[in-house]
Image (cartoon, coloured by chain):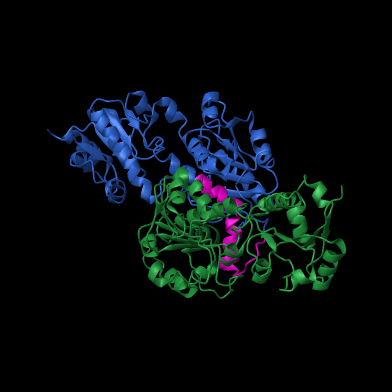
Chain colours: A green, B blue
Amino acid sequence: MNTPPIITSLSKHYFDQFFGSLSGYQDLLSGVYRVDPEEPYSTLVDKINSTQAKILVTAWDSRPLPESFLNDCPTLRYVCHLTGEMRWLIPRKLIEEGLLVTNWGSAIADTVAEGALYLILASLRRATNVTNTMHLRKGWELSVAPPESLLDKRVGIHGFGNIAQQLTLLLQPFRCQISAYSPPVPDPILDSFSVLREDSLENLFERNDIIVEVEALTGKTENMIGKDLLKRIRANGIFVNIGRGKLVREKDLEEIAREGKIFIGLDVYNEEPLSPDSPLRGLENVFLVPHQGGPTIDRISICAEHALANIHAYNAGRPLESLVGINEYDRMT
Amino acid sequence: MNTPPIITSLSKHYFDQFFGSLSGYQDLLSGVYRVDPEEPYSTLVDKINSTQAKILVTAWDSRPLPESFLNDCPTLRYVCHLTGEMRWLIPRKLIEEGLLVTNWGSAIADTVAEGALYLILASLRRATNVTNTMHLRKGWELSVAPPESLLDKRVGIHGFGNIAQQLTLLLQPFRCQISAYSPPVPDPILDSFSVLREDSLENLFERNDIIVEVEALTGKTENMIGKDLLKRIRANGIFVNIGRGKLVREKDLEEIAREGKIFIGLDVYNEEPLSPDSPLRGLENVFLVPHQGGPTIDRISICAEHALANIHAYNAGRPLESLVGINEYDRMT
């Protein structure tokens, strides 16, 4: 039996990162052609048409597709995106026209949740001040409020999708009281994680020791978190953003950060890379990570396995996991 | 009924930290006298003898007791030590003579275990290099090996007392394979935590991704961890010490750290505070914390509650928790 052809729009670097350590799936991988994203669009089209491929595999550095893509490649049915967000890659119109699209779904939600827990602990334990004290100033005594523990704390989560759900599992042994603000999520889901519902963002920010931002970025949520909310966090409370930078008015966050009354842990920013001039840099109550919540290097093959299982399913006529329809596309983080 | 007198050898600073936020126990606290540790020993003796006190409460900054203490204060029966280690405070002879001594037992083991998890995550996620990159160099790209996740990793623990046991609970949602080297701990205890036994330290260091040091410090374990063991850790593996600094030959650790092949997270050191000249300072594969694993500020009242429950028990003739006999005294960390 012939292996169905699969075209990948991936650099050699990412191709090797995703598929290099996979031992299974040799049957599938033998039908794979790689078209470098640096090649012109016409090379990709030619490869798809000459192989009559139905499947295109994409990731962070793939060549963005034009709205004419399905006209240009009439055999193409399915874009298997190895990672998460893809609005920069796939125009909405292609999904309207019936293109099947999947992404990593919840395959790395646990890794990102680990990143959230890490930002919480680093903020509670004053990591930036500690590191500067120990390494830079060669001292011993902190110059900010003393460290606190996560045990028995109140944690408020904005958003309650896959990452938030995985985070509640990681928090379980800490006996935290967890609440969430996420109007579209129904009670039975919150109940199944023993999470309380907050009726407003105001309450979420006011009633918790630690606030975690993991809401999806949409036109409605952009800039949703401003000074009015951040000011409600208790003295020495924690604000963590591992969702999207644009959920937060960064100018407001900078102002609150400079006041030094709360501790802040950030994985994401309005613009990435974060500008060298950002006033967030250098503040010792702020712990900064360069957008690394996502899959760490040792978890990348899990995304590839998730994708290949989907390709298997497609070839066998079975339903796909993590399908991105118009609704998912519009509220993508 | 009269409240039995209790003498405390505590500075006002620690007295307030331990007892300031306790709302219950007013009956007990009304019988408490504080003798500042700065006062001469004779003042403490006079206070105990004039009140006929049976109980002395101590902590980190109390005045060390001489071997003649029970002769000097014939009514004294019980030293309720609010914190952990006390060999610097109470001579072994006093325990041999029948002085009752308790400490915080396992009351803060979960907080220290949280500190261990934090050191693991900070090492895996390259916290020192990240902080210097973001805050000091105002950059974005790391200059050490990329971050890894804790999920599904092999964790090897040296020692399997209260802290290690609490750590296995915190690690549960990460699906780690946990093993321990701790010959005196019987199989049923390891089994009840689903922890495998390693037969040697060599295997512990060689077969795990992350090695955690929480062994008790005794004459036998001092300097137990040297270059021969540290060299067995895999490339980009993690070594964390939240036990005692003197378990490790620090010169060897410095040498391994300088090679940069593994990531290291330390809460404890041979000498504390760590010397400003320590070669560990400034290395970006080393995450340093100034001995803060212990009770964070928000957990200190838990130690006080544990102590007051013991004082209640003593006054009522009930058995004490966390008694320190000769065996416990000799293997104290």
Q: Does A49 sit left or right of B265 as displayed? A: right
Give the quadrant of the N terminus of chain B: top left
Write the residue at 77% across / 44% down.
Answer: A24
Q: Does the stretch in magenta take in B189?
A: no
**Residue B304 at x, y percent in the picture:** 31, 41
Write the residue at 21% across / 38% down.
Answer: B28
Q: Does B291 sit left or right of A81 as displayed? A: left
**Residue A100 at x, y percent in the picture:** 69, 60
Q: Nearer the viewer, residue B200 or B192?
A: B192
Read off the magenta span: B116-143
Q: Does A20 sit left or right of A121 as displayed? A: right
**Residue B221 at x, y percent in the picture:** 55, 33
Q: Nearer the viewer, residue A158 or A126?
A: A158
Choose top left, top right, bottom left or bottom right for residue B95: top left
Write the residue at 54% across / 74% down.
Answer: A278
Residue sitting at the far left: B1
**Residue A77 in view of the camera:** yes
Q: How many marks?
A: 0
Write the residue at 36% across / 29% down.
Answer: B323
Indicate whether B310 appears above or below A178. Answer: above
**Residue A332 in view of the camera:** no
Indicate whether B308 appears above or below A253. Answer: above
**Residue B305 at x, y percent in the picture:** 30, 40
Q: Which SS does the magenta portion mostly show? A: helix
Q: Does the stretch in magenta take in B121?
A: yes
